[in-house]
């Protein structure tokens, strides 16, 4: 499967050891494919079992979360925290509350987070966590009780210099507030143990926007390489959560037009663009309502609604999946190619099936991988940690300028790493290689520990 004997050996061992973990294996395989030339050129990695070590989390915590709903019923969920790699800094990564959360999903996200955080240039290791708890339709009080129970266990494993969780799907400012409150109550300690906090208690300006803004800054850099710009381009976006919202906002600011957003129920096609304050704010209202139906947008603004469909059938210049893993499959990839789309920009974590990636690549679509594109979110989390350590806060302009510079740096590192190994323009390979180099060098310097 791989040309390298070493990688074949490691990967088949990994398959044996993780038989029920398709998402984790998918994420690892994609990275190992990119690393072949690096591994071949540097025997030191095999000599030190670097790939074996990088594909095994340092620690994987699974715990029970019991909580009482508004009807007095006792509920049981499963909580996770994966502390994947601490070579370059304390574990850092989001918490996801979604029914699709499994050990496999947590491990794929934690594995990718390690590379992503490395790419930001900031000193953060990789971690991820969450629960199979489904927040949909739950009252505010139920969310609070769940968060308090979840943190009661999680608090034993995290800390401002150990492991710093943040949000992800199903975990926004409200949830981070409840989690922070419970941590403080348990420890009697006011520290920057979580990021994505409210502005009143140590949060950073621009953190809610950061993932989407960063993704669009990345697109800006990418388009420069091809002598193009965002102005006048049309975009298909999926999702309507925090990431899609920031993306839509920034595309508008830079003169592009987003014509789709989507939910679990289907997608809307807004030919004029999701381009007024009212429309953009409505994305937040839809999330707050907990209904999880993008049909509400179509009803309110009188635009096309495609029930049960995904936006990738629409002809646009740039495609940006912003929802969840494996949301773009081979059929979608065929649509994207048939529509003549030239730029495919992953924003959600691993939104593309392996088969779809292969098809897009074979048809010369430019692919920007999520671990580079969406790194602006965790990068501004890193800036939030820096501000907390200084007991200080930067203005929105300062944070935004730093974010823009960080994204330009990520693009440059990604582009140059691919070029260095003879794969110019292959940003998937570039991101994986650039992320890998820093982490593996740190591991080598620290001896055989983890
Ligand atoms: O996937 C991600 O990078 C996040 N959910 C953000 C993580 C963070 O620590 O801000």
Image (cartoon, helix red, strand yellow):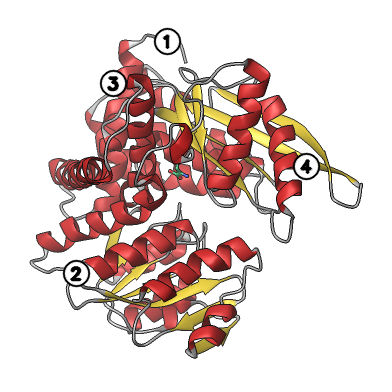
Front label number (1 vs 4): 4
- Considering every residue shown, the one lying at the far front of the view is 200
The residues bearing labels 1 and 4 have C-alpha atoms spaced at a distance of 36 Å
Q: Earlier in the sequence, mark 3 or mark 4?
A: 4
Disc 1 residue crowd, few under 14, some 14–19, many 20+, Cα 10 Å: few
The residue that disc 2 covers is 230
Q: Are marks 3 and 4 in contact (CB under 8 Å)?
A: no
Front label number (1 vs 2): 2
The residue that disc 3 covers is 441
Quadrant housing residue 236: bottom left
**Mark 2 C-beta to ligand 1 under 8 Å:** no
**Mark 3 C-beta to ligand 1 under 8 Å:** no
Secondary structure beneath disc 1?
loop
Q: Earlier in the sequence, mark 3 or mark 1?
A: 3
The residues bearing labels 2 and 4 have C-alpha atoms spaced at a distance of 43 Å
- Considering every residue shown, the one lying at the far left of the view is 227
The residues bearing labels 3 and 4 have C-alpha atoms spaced at a distance of 38 Å
Left or right: 60 as drawn, with respect to 419: right
The label number, if any, that marks residue 77 in the structure image: 4
**Mark 1 C-beta to ligand 1 under 8 Å:** no
Left or right: 64 as drawn, with respect to 231: right
The label number, if any, that marks residue 448 in the structure image: 1
Q: Is residue 179 above or below residue 444?
A: below
User: Residue 248, how many percent across, how many down?
Assistant: 35, 67
The residues bearing labels 3 and 1 have C-alpha atoms spaced at a distance of 12 Å
Secondary structure beneath disc 2?
loop
């Amino acid at each position: 499967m791989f040309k390298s004997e070493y990688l074949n050996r490691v990967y088949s061992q990994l398959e044996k050891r993780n038989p029920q973990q398709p998402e984790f294996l998918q994420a690892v395989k994609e990275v190992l494919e990119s690393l072949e030339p690096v591994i071949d050129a540097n025997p030191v990695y095999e000599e030190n079992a670097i790939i074996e070590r990088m594909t095994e989390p340092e620690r994987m915590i699974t715990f029970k979360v019991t909580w009482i709903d508004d009807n007095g019923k006792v509920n049981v969920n499963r909580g996770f925290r994966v502390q994947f790699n601490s070579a370059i800094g304390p574990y850092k990564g989001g918490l996801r509350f979604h029914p699709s959360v499994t050990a496999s999903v947590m491990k794929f996200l934690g594995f990718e987070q390690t590379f992503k955080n490395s790419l930001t240039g900031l000193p953060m290791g990789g971690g991820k966590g969450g629960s199979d708890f489904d927040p949909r339709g739950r009252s505010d009080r139920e969310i609070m009780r769940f968060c308090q129970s979840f943190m009661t266990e999680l608090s034993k494993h995290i800390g401002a210099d150990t492991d710093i969780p943040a949000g992800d799907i199903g975990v926004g400012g409200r949830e981070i507030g409840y989690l922070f409150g419970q941590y403080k109550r348990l420890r009697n300690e006011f520290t920057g143990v979580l990021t994505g906090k409210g502005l009143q208690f140590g949060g950073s300006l621009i953190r809610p926007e950061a993932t989407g803004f960063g993704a669009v800054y990345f697109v800006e850099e990418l388009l420069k390489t091809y002598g193009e710009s965002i102005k006048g381009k049309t975009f298909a976006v999926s999702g309507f959560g925090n990431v899609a919202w920031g993306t839509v906002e920034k595309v508008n600011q830079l003169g592009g037009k987003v014509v789709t957003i989507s939910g679990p129920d289907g997608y809307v096609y807004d030919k004029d663009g999701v381009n007024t304050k009212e429309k953009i704010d409505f994305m937040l209202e839809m999330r707050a309502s907990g209904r999880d139906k993008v049909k509400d947008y179509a009803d309110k603004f009188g635009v096309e609604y495609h029930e049960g469909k995904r936006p990738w059938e629409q002809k646009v210049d740039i495609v940006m999946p912003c929802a969840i893993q494996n949301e773009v499959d081979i059929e979608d990839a065929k649509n994207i190619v048939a529509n003549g789309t030239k730029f495919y920009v992953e924003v959600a974590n691993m939104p593309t099936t392996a088969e779809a990636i292969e098809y897009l690549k074979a048809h010369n679509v430019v692919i920007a991988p999520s671990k580079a594109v969406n790194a602006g979110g965790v990068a501004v989390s890193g800036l939030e940690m820096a501000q907390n350590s200084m007991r200080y806060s930067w203005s929105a302009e300062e944070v935004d300028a730093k974010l823009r510079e960080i994204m330009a740096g990520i693009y440059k590192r990604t582009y140059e790493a691919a070029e260095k190994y003879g794969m110019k323009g292959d940003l998937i390979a570039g991101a994986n290689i650039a992320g890998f180099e820093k982490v593996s060098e740190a591991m080598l310097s620290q001896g055989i520990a983890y």
